[in-house]
Amino acid sequence: MIPVRCFSCGKVISHVWEEYRERIKSEPPGKVLDDLGIESYCCRRMLLSHVEIVDTLRRYQ
Amino acid sequence: MKVELIQLEEDRIRFLLSGATAAFANGLRRACMSEVPTLAIDEISLYDNTSVLFDEQIGLRIGMIPLQVEDLDLFSEPEECQCGGEGCPGCRVDFMLSVEGPGMVYSRDLQFTDPGVKPAFDKIPIVILGEGEKLVIEGYATKHAGREHSKWQSGTLCGYKNLPTIEIGDCSGCGKCVEVCPRKVLVLEDGRAKATNILECSLCKLCIEECDAGAIKVVPVLDSFVLSIETSGCMPVKELVARASDGIRKRAETLDRKLAELS
């Protein structure tokens, strides 16, 4: 699961995660982040570097 | 002391504070980050959790959700409450969360008993539930300041810098400084470099290094500061700065009173 807030500055970033994940399929991630108002590089790396592993974990429940 | 507004949005503000000391500007910055109390979920009881996340992870995620309150002054911090910290409607807001999968559990699914309290963002994912997975939580939010834990932090990205001035002496008009400036502060005008949009200058001093003639001086104005403050979403930024300054004033008054008692 995407962390609720940015590790460094504390800004909430998780509320844009689903929209971000959909939009990067067809648009460049940098532009999407600009659009969503994620400006600082600490917050941008939260979304850029996130890997969703919840569905993989579920198989071993 | 003078305050001049540069930019104001719902969640961020930039203003110029002149005629103040660095200590005061920093005091305001720190008050915004750690002295303004707000509500955050403090304790939970998990009745059922068959999701892929551990109970502790869910607790942590729920705690970090900023909460908006209609009238924050209705609540008091548990330590200062009439009930003596035992827990009463004056210092606690109860909530319920009961969801069955499949599907995503969002912050908007939190049901608070007080209609004046709601999550600042509706679409914060808490956990994704698979077929037949269940999450049943009950708990309460309390009021504290950011110094206690970052979940109560009302101001997130707060900073200040000295107001810069750029003095340009004997300019040859080569334009190197214009090219090297990362914030596009300098422009060429009539064969001379000129500083525009001085508030954007980050005092990186690349232009000084680049200038062969040594004509550029970047000098910070020592008693003027550009403060930029952002909130976590729990309150509008105007309210945050007002509450932070109010807090500083109150503490200064307390100090004044205590000193008067001593002498």
Image: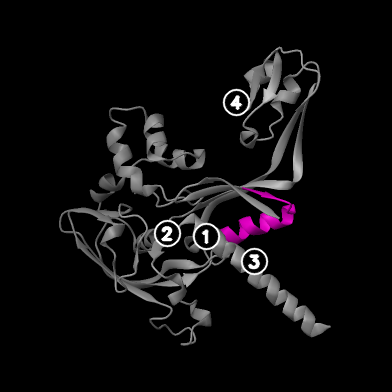
Q: Give the mark, 1 or 3, whose residue is nearer the N terminus.
A: 1
Q: In the rendered structure, which amino acid carries the disc numbered 2?
A: Met
- Magenta stretch in the rendered image: B16-33
Neighbor class of circle 4 (other Cα within 10 Å; few <14, some 14-19, many 20+) is: some
Instruction: Specify which label sits upstream in the sequence, 2 or 1.
Output: 2
Q: Quadrant of residue B116?
A: bottom left
Mark positioned earlier in the residue sequence (4 or 1):
4
With respect to residue B92, does B196 lie above or below? Answer: above
Task: Nearest to the eye among marks 2 and 1: give it.
Answer: 1
Quick one: SS at disc 3?
helix
Return the mark for residue B184: 4
Query: Badge 3 sits on which subunit?
Result: B
Mark 3 belongs to which amino acid? Ile
Q: Nearer the viewer, residue B2 or A10?
A: B2
Q: Which residue is mark 2?
A: B64
Disc 2 + disc 1, Cβ < 8 Å: no
Is B215 displayed left or right of B206 in the figure? right
Amino acid type at circle 4 is: Lys
Residue B161 shown in magenta: no
Outermost residue on the right side: it is: B263
Identify the residue at horizontal 47%, vertical 42% (top origin): A43
Horizontal and vertical percent position of residue B34? 57, 62
**3D distance between C-alphas at marks 1 and 3:** 12 Å
Residue on which the image places disc 1: B240
Is the magenta region chiefly helix, strand or loop? helix
Instruction: Say whether residue A39 is left or right of residue A29.
Output: right
Q: Please tell me the numbered disc located at residue B248.
A: 3
User: Circle 1 — which element?
Assistant: helix
* Whether residue A2 can be seen here: no
Residue B215 image position (x, y, % from top left): 80, 21
Residue B252 placement, left or right of B231: right
